[in-house]
Amino acid sequence: QVQLVESGGGLVQPGGSLRLSCVASGIIFSNSATGWYRQAPGKQREFVAAITPGGRANYADSVKGRFTISIDYAKNTAYLQMNSLKPEDTAVYYCSATSLYSYWGQGTQVTVSS
């Protein structure tokens, strides 16, 4: 059974930083395309960042230069380092992993507010 568990969300002031973690079981990130998505209230889920098994990363324009996706393959854990956070980054953030199928975590809330 595949399980993705996100953590690290919370309340942060504008300009602050957070690091989200996604621990996987039942699937190996080194064999999967891994991504982070987010969904703000009243909006559709949107792409944030992704990384291929070969280590190539790509980002949504709205987070480029501020967010960094990475994977610790030894821990089978994905990360999303978020810097210079803005109120518009407020959303539930989801981790996903795709091999033959796509799997999703339950999400972690990020709120950027003063």
Image (cartoon, helix red, strand yellow):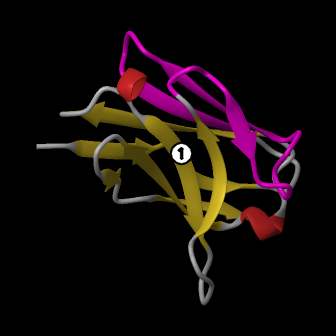
The residue labelled by disc 1 is 35
Where residue 12 appears, as percent x and y from the top left, is: 71, 53
* Residue type marked 1: Gly
**Residue 66 sits in which quadrant?**
top right
At 23% from the left and 44% from the top, the residue drawn is 3
Q: Could you tell me which residue is drawn at 84 percent across and 58 percent down?
A: 62
Total tally of numbered discs in the picture: 1
63 inside magenta stretch: yes
Q: Residue furthest top?
A: 74
Q: Residue furthest left?
A: 1
User: Where does the image place residue 10, in percent across and percent down from the top left?
Assistant: 57, 54
| 101 in relation to 45, above or below | above
Is residue 9 in view from this perspective? no
Residue 1 location (% of width, % of height): 10, 43
For image coordinates 48% across by 31% down, the residue present is 78
> From the viewer's perspective, is residue 46 above or below residue 42?
above
Give the crowd class for mark 1: few <14, some 14-19, many >=20 residues within 10 Å.
many
* Residue 78, above or below 40: above
Outermost residue toward the bottom in this view:
42
Please give left or right for residue 35 compared with residue 40 in the image.
left
Residue 43 appears in the picture as rendered: yes
Q: Residue at x 59, y 83 (%)?
A: 41
- Provide the residue span drawn in magenta: 53-81
Query: Seen in the image, is 21 located left or right of residue 43?
Result: left
Residue in the foreground of this view, choosing between 74 and 110: 74
Find out whether residue 64 is within the magenta segment. Answer: yes
Secondary structure of the residue carrying numbered label 1: strand
At which x and y percent is residue 39? 57, 72
Occupied quadrant, residue 70: top right
Q: Quadrant of the C terminus?
A: bottom right
